[in-house]
Image (cartoon, grey):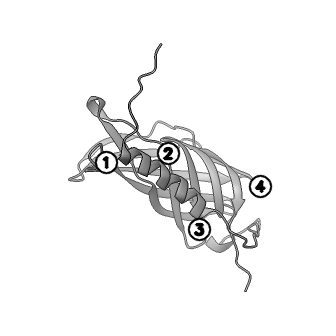
Amino acid sequence: MLAHHTPLSRRTLVRHIGLVGLGIALAPAGAATKAPRAGASTLAQHPVLGHWLAVTPLGPAHIRFDPDGTVLIAWPHSGDGPNGYYEYTTSATGSWQPFGDHGLDLDVVAIDEDATGRATGTTSLASRLVVSADGGTFRSDIATNRLTTTSVDQAILSVRADGLPMSGIRMWPEVVVND
């Protein structure tokens, strides 16, 4: 089977360069690192803090969990939308809340765009995750992932709650700057 090849547009090139830049910007630069304490009950001590390489319902991603409860997910891809049109999903931002010592609830939203850069709606992801005892991996807690796609006028187009797995491996822990 022959693969369909389309020329790389300026817009696509800029998006890919932006994703590489985002990855570089999120990398720790000479700062000391400190792994979060196990048995944490607060955001600042939760074992999820830091950067993760993850498998999500929308594909592979880089996820950053911050101690203030914010989360950023960057997917290094775009794809074909309805009717064969190119579609781009922005990075998703949102929040996380701990439950127990190793669990967390995650809620993020990404903006969907068409080939012209026009917003077509949003995609949100909600999931319940559990970090392993050693802090090196996380996984979905049972079948808790939910993807919701909405149109520009916020009409719900689809809700997928079919238990798609979500898992991750730690890339590096949260960066702590020593004073």
| Residue 48 appears left or right of 155 | right
Q: Earlier in the sequence, mark 1 or mark 4?
A: 1
Q: Residue at x 62, y 71 (%)?
A: 43
In this view, the residue farthest toward the right is 134
Kind of residue indicated by mark 2: Asn
Q: Residue at x 47, y 36 (%)?
A: 162
Which residue position is annotated with label 3?
Answer: 66
Indicate the secondary structure of the residue bearing disc 1. strand
Would you call the spot at circle 1 few (<14 residues within 10 Å), some (14-19), or many (20 or more)? Answer: some
Q: What label does residue 113 carry, if any?
A: 1
Indicate the secondary structure of the residue bearing disc 4. loop
Q: Earlier in the sequence, mark 2 or mark 3?
A: 3
Spatial CA span between label 3 and label 4: 19 Å
Spatial CA span between label 1 and label 3: 27 Å
Please identify, in this view, whether the residue under mark 2 or under mark 1 is nearer the observer. Answer: 1
Spatial CA span between label 2 and label 1: 23 Å
Indicate the secondary structure of the residue bearing disc 3. loop
Q: Residue at x 76, y 66 (%)?
A: 35
Q: Nearer the viewer, residue 12 or 126?
A: 12
Q: What label does residue 145 carry, if any?
A: 2
Kind of residue indicated by mark 1: Glu
In this view, the residue farthest toward the left is 153
Spatial CA span between label 1 and label 4: 39 Å
Q: Residue 12: x and y, percent?
A: 40, 45
Q: Would residue 166 be seen by someone viewing this image from the given angle?
A: yes
